[in-house]
Amino acid sequence: MADIQAPVPGTFYQKPSPEDPPFKSEGDAVKTGDTIGLVEVMKSFIEVEAEADGTFAGYSAENEAAVSAGDVLATLK
Amino acid sequence: MSIKRLFIANRGEIAVRIVRAARSLGIHTIQAHSEADADMLAVRMADEAVCIGPAQASKSYLDAAAVVRAAKEAGADAVHPGYGFLAESPAFARAVVEAGMIYVGPSADTIQSMGDKVSARQVAATAGVPVVPGSDGRVDDLDEAAAIAERIGYPVMIKASAGGGGRGIRIAETESDLAKFAPQARQEAQAAFGDGGIYLEKVIAQPRHIEVQILGDGTRAVHCFERECSLQRRRQKVWEEAPAFGLPEATRTAMCDAAVDLAEAVEYCGAGTVEYLYDAQSDKFYFIEMNTRIQVEHPVTEMITGLDLVALMIRVCGGEALPVTQGEIKLTGHAIEVRLNAEDPHKKFMPFPGVVGTLDLPESDGIRVDHFLYEGYQIPPFYDSLIGKLIVHADTREAAIDKMVGALDAVRIDGLKTTIPLHKALANSPDVRAGRIHTQWLEPWLEAGNLEGTKGGAS
């Protein structure tokens, strides 16, 4: 298991835009550097990238949740 | 003064500014805040505070119904929108008035007509304000387009009538460009918007951004001279001055008089700004838009005129006649404001919403800091990155820049990354000193690496 953490505080988004599906679904293969979500901080959108290869186990943070830096956003297995 | 209880529907430094102005007028202040802003400075300073919703602006500061309801429940008789959020929403202004309160700003109709680019251009042109030369509406015939381009002068922009957000824009340098691009633009517009209508507008190369502050009481309007806001990054102003530098006196007078004419034509009430593009080479100015609210950079105007613009807008919207005549408003010296943003200029201006550590913001004669900081304050990540504004005033522009250098060295904001290193580099730039700047100057200057080699320092 590997955790993917929020790089900055802000609002977490699982999707690139409200109409799109989430970046990843359970069981998806994840490569280092893949974008798994966005954190909106002070009107800027920061991409959240996986720092290891693995299989996507699911999001730990709700879509549009307020998150702190270091909060676990998703996990890999 | 009919306003007794003012509801402040904004946050950050402008909320602090409005609380101060209201207090100076003896008005009871009710500060709105989101759940994430319960400990912001304006909440601590105001007489009362009301939570209007969750952290997300769309569910709090941008929720017009929630704001009006909260203001009404708190017994407010007036609402100040500040800038941003709902400050230029005609629907919000209308809802405030329909709920029986005073809106501190112009009428909903004025906000609406100035908020639409096409109608604003028409109103401005009717009031005799110069607009960017172009075709009057759409052009369907290529010969006609060529004749218009010849009249207004190349280069010209070809824009889609139904377009927006820069889509379908082409620049023609010559008549043969026009002959080639116009049909392309028409085709693209037809495909993208289902309407192949195009129109032409003159390209203003390397324009400066100069804007005029106005105040109106619904009948009479005055100007408070102009501001120069040409230093911009991603269309955001970073450094503003008053007055504009090297502007011929006749041009200044024409710009200011045109702004007053426009304000009176729309029976403007409150504080507003008429924005122009200025082409220094031809010494010509063109109306871009009117902002129907107080602006971030209003302090530079206050420094050169001695007026309290926020207090004045509250007074005139409360029903008073303008208490100043044009002749009483004098321009003294030169003022500069820099925007302090919680961003790391050395890391592509990455936002940095940290906890404020040791804070030293020396204010003295001619140095003013508008902000919402205190030691131990956690800057929330949910809103924009402006944490304060450093403003200086001196006899001349040269002296003001020197004073800014000293002030930037003296300011200490621990715990955050800020844009102070950017401002230090700008203050030392020969182009800025000499006034060789325009709205497209800053971004290439940054890309050329002019920030590197400046110290991050105590910012």
Image (cartoon, coloured by chain):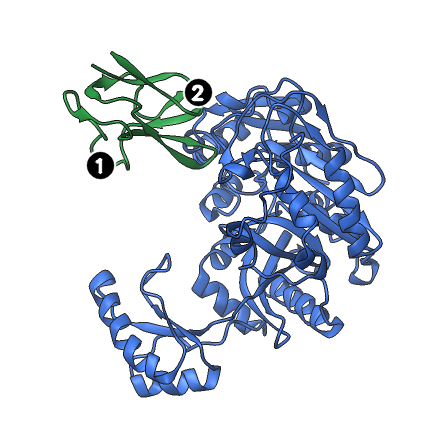
User: Residue B206 or B35: which is nearer the viewer?
Assistant: B206
Look at the image and tell me in which quarter the N terminus of chain B lies: top right
- Please tell me which residue is depicted at 23% across the width and 38% down the height of the picture: A19
Q: Is residue A51 visible?
A: yes
Q: Is residue B84 above or below residue B186?
A: above
* Residue A1, image quadrant: top left
Labelled disc at residue B240: none
User: Residue B412 or B101: which is nearer the viewer?
Assistant: B412
Of all chains in the rendering, the one displayed in green is A
Q: Earlier in the sequence, mark 2 or mark 1?
A: 1
Q: Is residue B319 visible?
A: no
Q: Left or right? Give the position of B165 relative to B224.
A: left
Q: Residue furthest left?
A: A27
Q: Residues within 10 Å of mark 2 (few under 14, many from 20)?
A: few
Look at the image and tell me in which quarter the C terminus of chain B lies: top right
Mark 1 is on which residue type?
Asp
- Please tell me which residue is depicted at 35% across the width and 83% down the height of the picture: B145
Mark 2 is on which residue type?
Ala
Q: Residue B197, how many percent across, how many down?
A: 29, 72
- Chain letter behind tag 2: A
Of all chains in the rendering, the one displayed in blue is B
User: Residue B458 or B394: which is nearer the viewer?
Assistant: B458
Q: Is residue A39 above or below residue A3?
A: below
Q: Residue B305, how many percent across, how many down?
A: 79, 53
- Please tell me which residue is depicted at 72% across the width and 49% down the height of the picture: B336
Q: Residue B78, how many percent across, how many down?
A: 61, 37
Labelled disc at residue A20: 1
Q: Where does label 2 land, which residue?
A: A69
